[in-house]
Image: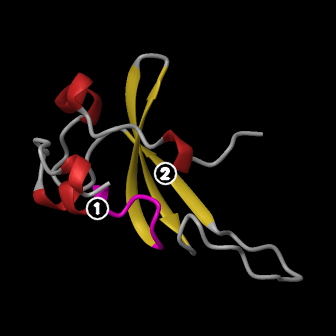
């Protein structure tokens, strides 16, 4: 993913940096298109996307998501700033809706 975002124009250095960590353990930005609208998720993963979850007798939250409208660092409205020039969609990293 990091090579695919190298040519992008980002709203700020912090947003660019965290986009490169999508799908990895920790925080990352997951861009995706939803009904022709560009959307962004601030996602936290307890494990890398490919890792198997450990056995636990209590519920574990392995992925948490927060849908973003504005950049948390510079405040730009993401949909308008990126438009059709957003980072490549990573919809496979989203949590499946029930």
Q: Residue at x 29, y 42 (%)?
A: 70
Q: Mark 1 — residue?
A: 18
Residue 14 highlighted magenta (yes or no): no
Question: Relative to 70, is 64 on the left or the right?
Answer: right
Dot label at residue 66 = 2
Q: Percent position (x, y) of residue 31?
A: 38, 41
State how far apart marks 1 and 2 are (Cα): 14 Å
Question: Relative to 60, is 56 on the left or the right?
Answer: right
Question: Relative to 16, is 54 on the left or the right?
Answer: right
Task: Specify few, some or many for label 2: CA neighbours under 10 Å numbering under 14, 14-19, or 20 or more.
Answer: few
Q: Secondary structure at mark 1?
A: helix
- The part of the chain drawn in magenta is 18-25
Picture layout, residue 25 above or below residue 33: below
Quarter of the figure that contains the C terminus: top right
Quarter of the figure that contains the N terminus: bottom left
Q: Residue at x 49, y 17 (%)?
A: 35
Callout 1–callout 2 Cβ contact below 8 Å: no
Task: Specify few, some or many for label 1: CA neighbours under 10 Å numbering under 14, 14-19, or 20 or more.
Answer: some
Picture layout, residue 80 above or below residue 40: above
Residue nearer the viewer, 22 or 79: 22
Foreground: disc 1 or disc 2: 1
Q: Percent position (x, y) of residue 20?
A: 29, 60
Q: Percent position (x, y) of residue 40?
A: 39, 41
Residue nearer the viewer, 2 or 15: 2
Q: Secondary structure at mark 2?
A: strand
């Amino acid at each position: 993913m990091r090579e695919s975002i190298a040519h992008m124009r980002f709203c700020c250095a912090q947003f660019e940096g965290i986009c490169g960590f999508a799908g990895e353990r920790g925080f990352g930005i997951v861009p995706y298109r939803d009904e022709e609208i560009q959307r962004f998720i601030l996602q936290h993963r307890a494990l890398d996307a490919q890792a198997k979850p450990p056995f636990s007798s209590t519920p574990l939250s392995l992925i948490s998501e927060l849908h973003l409208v504005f950049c948390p660092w510079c405040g730009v409205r993401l949909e308008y700033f990126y438009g059709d020039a957003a980072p490549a969609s990573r919809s496979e990293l989203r949590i499946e809706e029930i």
